[in-house]
Image: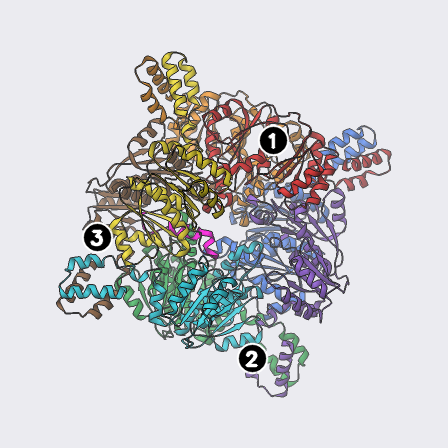
Chain colours: A cyan, B yellow, C brown, D red, E orange, F purple, G green, H blue
């Protein structure tokens, strides 16, 4: 649409229907176009074959349902994050192909399963309490076209495979958040650390893990927001396309 | 009442019924009069035609009902903020002309719709989750006599109109809180930034947005409290009367 | 320059020298143009007759001198903020008309003294320790074309004049930061509160004042960053042009 | 009991039944005696006619009931703080003379109403949301033998009386917490400031009010914990006995 | 002066030279009078025989010298807080009777040594590093007309005397800040706790001590700002006049 | 299993079936083996006769039941922490010998009651609200083979016995967290301080107590996480084996 | 060395000189080997041709000189970070080929200039004050074998090239830290955000920027520690090898 | 002295010179005696052969010299912590046998070298920047009669020996503070974690390390204050005497 607006404007310029100064004036107000907070994902989807994403919290089932329907009219894959089971049940009635992942509250319509990533992404988590965050990362990375290996019990075999196979590693950990450093010290792949809000007391809802990861002595570690499995899966997917 | 007290005192002075020293002594204790926390809004309403405002949280339906009735005896417009639907329903029975806005929990009796603002106020928000705060700002600015344009999906047309029309811009944003800076960089109007508590993890209930806005590189941005749509609408209204 | 680029592009389109698709492609990369962090002040200066501003900290005397010279070639007024006396002395040798304000470290070349503000701006501060911040606000508001009244000892006469004359009020306060609320309760003008880092102990370098101001019970108060006299002067100037 | 232990030991010493070194050894372990965290209130009650106090949170109705019964066997007055209505109802069945104050959750058995304070204590609060904290302060000060004036709507008459009558002033305020400073600037009496957790956003559950009060420019202000109406009432009572 | 203004206004009213409405209008702007931040200490000094106080930080030697000279023209006693030795030396040349206390940086002109306090104030500190804060409290309490006992090594004799003699106790402590609780558990007098910024690591410049004191289990403890020996001495003085 | 893997590898080396370089390569990936986050407790149990521990939060009743069954197949003692009553009831049906401690939510299967500790561990708490944390510490220390004395009302007798008998002392305290310092000053044994989240206002969910304990003036005090009764009991058990 | 130890052990196993159980026992203590905090960079350098890195702060010139000499005996490239000019001057005397970058305090011996990265890395910064951090990132990425484009004035041309050429983008920004989000919204490459400690007041030494970046609405953004230009350059280099 | 006071009192009781009630009254004021903040170390030294300790910061060379001289009159060993080289040099002139450790600023007079610890204490640190804290721990543990092994480069041999020999392990680490968890996972001994203020940015002067250690997944880890090498050495010494 915006492209069309622009094209129309340029055609008017070429046709002499709009003079240069008027065109300049209208163009001066364009900068926001591509940022366009609410529209940016759509633009990207058109250009890069990525899924449409609906951040669930704060939206009603009606709103999500309407947005999902609209998006599925033009995109193959849609990911809805962090919705409760009731909302998911209702959406699944309307979108029978949708899978729901209750630990993370992710709902996924995954019609185009083309692999875009060049290798595997490993998703590691420190303990069972970190599983919801790891699941969100995995669901995201998969729907973005990646093969994902999940490691919930990190033993020797796991590390061996990590080193051999994963091009990008996601590590989710709460409490002290030391696991990304340990993994980062063992692999040469980029490691995306996801602090989780798992813990109690001086974990301060993930703050301890976040600070630990930011201060990691392993320099291949970068960090995303607390509990942001989606962001980790998304960034890892981009890296895996490199 | 206080005015009357003062007038009475002065008349006694003029009549010689109170001597200067006694009057001085009584006057020395006046300073608090106009601050008078609980009375200040009423004074203002008398002088400036502003609405009476009842901050809802912590008050029972009974209390709000009684206060509203008392205020409506002397004021045309009353705004009640942040009340749940049950309380609103009951109040609407007693005040059939009252509108209720469920997203923000605002209830408004808007009998005098005189426009006091000289231009339009724009209320922009970054995402649908910020809508409740934006709604509170809009409802407030309207009942204070302003024409308000709401922009919930900031595209090129929106920015164009913002620049052309709004004398004051309110921008509500959670998470990183970057939208006010972007808007502030594009318009010359004063921008009131409202951090919202929308987000998770390291958004720390609006702290990240608040800090981001306070550090904005756009110098036309000033900031109000987290989620304080009312304060933003109020301050914008004063600016729009300038 | 960017305007020229754009104009050139449009002229090429009109002349048929660039086809629509190529023009579209080049335009698609424009969004950042007007944000252009480093260039934005310059654009504004061209459009609005505002001063050029150089934020001093982190720049060497050489850098500031070169930037100031470049800016003065195209702008009448230049403001340099937060530079020490040695740097100011050197700049004053090169720019004899520059005034230096040692309390705030502001240096100002003020050649075009047109008044752009429609009324007066009041700059109030709680104590002598807050003077540097108030001075920065005053110097800024003046060079942006405003008449400024400074109130460093807020007594009855001051408040009287505040209420009668100021269209916008700036209040600088450290420690508990309560003065903006008190002033805000007495005037109907917009009040811009500037927390200062003045204080000790639990003032936490201005955090106590900042939080106090954000929680002000006076709804005409908006807040800028700690010690940000410049931002307060800038925002007040825009409001005073309304 | 401990007193008896000590007396017994000393009598053994006098009787020669315990030699000096053995007595020294046993005494070396006494220091905790009077601190005795759990016993200290009881000791004080014996010596000073103060009420027994039961801090309610974390105790079951059974526990509170048993403790209250035990205490009432030896003390005239008992104060239970912060208990919900259900617990209060049950206690009132067993202690028909107990009054319950639902705003603050205080329950009071007040059999000995001797006045110990030499003058009046004023309890001021900024808004209706601060009433629960003010009520706890008032209930406490009364049961400790003080005449209390409550000021919930601070106008000129209130301030006048405050200045004339109160020997000690308690001020409860949330949000920015500026009221204690204003009151402190108007009266010469000691002012005990109680930050309340009332507010939202950057009030951070009373932190803003707490910091504001600690940084008060009125030097007659001292501060107690957030929402600690009990502590304010207690400390004010001691001051009023001076 | 303000009193004179008011008196003049009232006399004009009595004389019929100003009509009631005009007088009302002028009076409406009075509220700030008695707050008058910058003037309040002076007012108090006139009314209560208290010392004039100059908060040193942020003032030049010239400024302090001029203010002190002006104050000493109308007051017997002046206290200057937190000035370095160089400034003190210069002031002592001009005010030979001034004493300087280098640990706290206090300078005191103490010409009227009338005792206003009814009993003794005890100033206790936990360790030698807390001495500067304790000294500021002691110097303040003395110049306000109190007999002060300093306890820097709290042993049994000290506690004994504390209990027997002090009407008010000030306790300064850094690190964990537990001493006020211990003292508070042993005496019935009001205890003013002063957290000090002494410590390292997780003492966070006095924050740990501040939080500890606010959470004290001894209910006779109230708290002032970190390192605020002056405020403690001032508040204790008011209590000791009760 | 891992041991078996290693043994198999070494046997292959000895047999010449794997050459040194290949073995080196496989061994290079072993480092994680013994860390093995999820497996470490099991390894220890095998080697040290310690109980298996299941951290309850975030696990379903099904999960806990399955894990407990698996662990009890190879270990005598199992401790499940922080589970609600419903889950405990269900587990007790399957494991009739399991004891449940409702205050702390601990569930314990304690079949091998061998004493491993050389002396007694004392568990002290400041108030009844700290009991759940103290209970978790006690339950843990007991199932790890220690005789535990619990002191919930610290009087002279308690302290006497503490000094005489306990080899290690655990002190649980919320609010200001001063008790560990006091105890630490009276005993020579190592003191493990457990801050509890008990309190309100500026206790900030245990932060005040945590900071107080970290700044303790008693050098025999070390600290564990807020509410971490389990960790205190575990560490104390190791010390008591020394 | 460790490799040799291992090899020796395996050879002993093969030779039958060490039996399996003894070998197992020795191997059980190996886990730390490869982590080996102090040795890990060296291992990597051997395997991946990466530079040796010496973190300068806290080391004396003597120590750095000795370590650098030792490392240069076995590695082609060495990077020393964050050393002052004096130390750099001395090192340059001993290592004439070393370049020194005074803004960031980086010193680099760059003998092997093989390109390992598959594309370009862009290093963007928001303002001149962020240059030191950007420089550290650039120097690091270069010595790790990458072609780097630096963008210190982000205009349209810069963005154009960014989108066309960079495989990985590093964005350094202080204050509000919004630039990474803006860049992240315009490019599809992974963006590594580096908050800088540039700013004042509520920037809290980079905390505001850090929180803003963690809450970025652009999902291709990951974050490293405040001022950690080195870490960003390192992680970007790994991504650019993918 | 206090012992003597007590003995004298008891003798008077035995002699009938003081009656029981008077003795009781005097004893009631004793509680502070043994706490006696300033005296407690001395008492302990008399009873347990521990060194006298002088915490250096905030004391002048004169004060330290006088205290040290007094202490050495009655104790064999004295430890002075955290003094700069100049002060140490002067003290060494007066106490030729004193050793000075410049990294940590410790000065030690170690005349009685009896071993009180039953085994070895290991002091581990993560990097060279943590050495000052580790040194303080080592110096303290040695002067308290322990054999100490220092591990500054934790490789396989080190870990092996740690597991075989150390009864207590001290681990000092800054930045993310993960090393204590790793060590804690490998050894069965009690581990005392010392967060150091080493780091930058989001390490927040040791806060990140502190939080990481408090949230450690290794349950044998307890924590002391940031940079508190002395406290770790002291607590470890007590444990090693068990």
Q: Residue furthest top?
A: B16
| Image coordinates for residue E203, horizontal then vertical, percent | 54, 47
Q: In which quarter of the image is residue G155?
A: bottom left
Residue at the image position 38 percent from the left and 58 percent from the top: G85
Q: Which chain carries label 3?
A: C
Q: Is residue C130 magenta?
A: no
Q: Position of residue H178 (x, y in %)?
A: 55, 62
Tell me the crowding category of disc 2: few under 14, some 14 to 19, or many 20 or more residues within 10 angstroms, Cα based. Answer: some
What range of the chain is rendered magenta? Answer: B198-222
The residue under label 3 is C70
| Residue B11 versus residue F37 in the image, above or below | above
Above or below, comparing residue F32 to residue D228 in the picture: below
- Parent chain of label 1: D
Crowding near pointer 1: few (<14 within 10 Å), some, many (20+)? many
In the rendered image, residue B1, in percent from the top left (x then y), is placed at 41, 25
Mark 1, residue position: D141
G104 to C94, vertically: above or below = below
Q: In this view, does D16 lie to the left or right of H81?
A: right
**Label 2 chain ID:** F
Q: Disc 1 on helix, strand or loop?
A: helix
Q: Give SS at disc 2.
A: helix
Are discs 2 and 1 located on one and the same chain?
no
């Amino acid at each position: 649409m915006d492209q069309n607006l622009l094209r129309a404007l340029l055609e008017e310029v070429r046709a002499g229907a709009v003079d240069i100064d008027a065109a300049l004036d209208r163009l001066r107000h364009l900068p926001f176009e591509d940022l366009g907070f609410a529209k940016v994902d759509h633009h990207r989807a058109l250009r890069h074959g990525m899924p449409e994403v609906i951040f669930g919290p704060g939206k009603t089932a009606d709103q999500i349902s309407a947005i999902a329907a609209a998006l599925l009219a033009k995109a193959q894959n849609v990911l809805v994050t962090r919705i409760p089971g009731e909302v998911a049940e209702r959406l699944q009635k309307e979108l029978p192909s949708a899978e729901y992942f209750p630990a993370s509250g992710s709902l996924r319509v995954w019609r185009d399963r083309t692999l875009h990533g060049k290798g595997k992404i490993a998703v590691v988590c420190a303990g069972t309490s970190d599983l919801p965050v790891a699941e969100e990362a995995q669901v995201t990375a998969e729907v973005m076209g990646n093969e994902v290996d999940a490691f919930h019990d990190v033993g020797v075999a796991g590390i061996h495979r990590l080193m051999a196979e994963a091009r990008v590693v996601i590590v989710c950990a709460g409490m002290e958040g030391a696991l990304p450093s340990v993994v980062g010290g063992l692999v040469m792949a980029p490691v995306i650390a996801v602090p989780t809000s798992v813990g109690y007391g001086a974990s301060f809802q993930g703050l301890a893990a976040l600070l630990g990861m930011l201060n990691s002595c392993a320099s291949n570690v970068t960090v995303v927001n607390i509990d942001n499995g989606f962001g980790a899966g998304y960034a890892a997917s981009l890296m895996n396309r490199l």
